[in-house]
Amino acid sequence: MELNENELLQKISQDDSIAFEALYNHYRLDIYRFIYKFIKSPELSDDLCQEIFIRIWENRNSLVMIKSFKPYLYTITKNHTLNFLKRASVDSKAMGVIYSTFSEKRNEMEDNLITNEYLNHLRNILNTLPAQSREVFKLCRQQGHSYDEVAQMLGISRSCVKKHMVRSMRTLKLSVVKEFGISLSIFLICTKF
C-alpha cells in the first residue's frame, strides 16, 4: 500500500472514496479467503466480503479511532461470517447453498474419516434418545418432512413433534459442542444429516 494505513483511514473518514478503494483492494482477497475457509462457497464468500466493506464505508467516521485496522477488520469479518452461519442454520435455502459448495470442495479421504467419526458420534447420541424422538428426528432432519407431515404420519400433534425435535436438537447440540467444539449446524453440514 502506497499510503500509510493511518493516513488512509483518516482520508476515508473524510469521505475519500479513492482511499477507500485502495484499502479495499489491499484487503479484499485476504478477507475473501478468510470467509471462504468457513463458507466454502465462492458466491456467498464474495457477498459477505462486499457486506463487510460496505459496513466499513458506512462507519467510516469512526475509523480514525482504530489503532490497528487489520485486527479490527478480521474481527468484523469473523463476527459477520459467524452471524451469517447462525442465520443460515435456520434458512434452508442458504444452508443448501453452503452445503452443496462445501461438499464439492472438500478432500474426499479426509472427508470420509471426519464424516465417519461424526456419523458414529451422531448415531450413538441418537441411540440414547427415546424411540419416538429418534423417529421424529429421522423423519424431520434426515428425510426432510415438515412437522405437520410427521405429525400426520405418526398420529401425534404438531406440538408433540416440535417437543421431540427440540429435545433431540438440544441433546445433540450439547454433545457436539462438548465432544468436537463446533456448532451443531456445522456438525450437521459435515455429516450430511
Image (cartoon, rainbow, N blue to C red):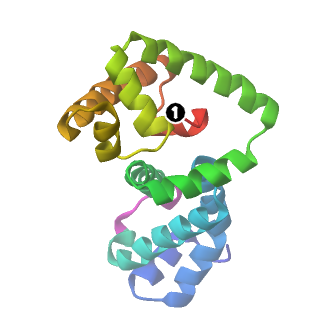
In the rendered image, which residue does mark 1 sit on?
187
- Give the amino acid type for the residue marked by disc 1 in the picture: Phe
The reply, left or right, for residue 25 in relation to residue 142 is right
Q: Nearer the viewer, residue 127 or 155?
A: 155
Quadrant of residue 109 within the rendered picture: top right
Observer able to see residue 73: no
SS type, badge 1:
helix
User: As displayed, is residue 127 above or below residue 139?
Assistant: above
Residue at point 66% right, 63% down?
A: 42
Q: Residue 63: x percent and y percent?
A: 39, 70
Q: Residue 81: x percent and y percent?
A: 47, 54
User: As displayed, is residue 39 above or below residue 9?
Assistant: above
Residue at point 66% right, 54% down?
A: 101
Observer able to see residue 137: yes
Check if residue 66 falls in the magenta segment: yes
Which quadrant of the rendered structure holds the C terminus?
top right
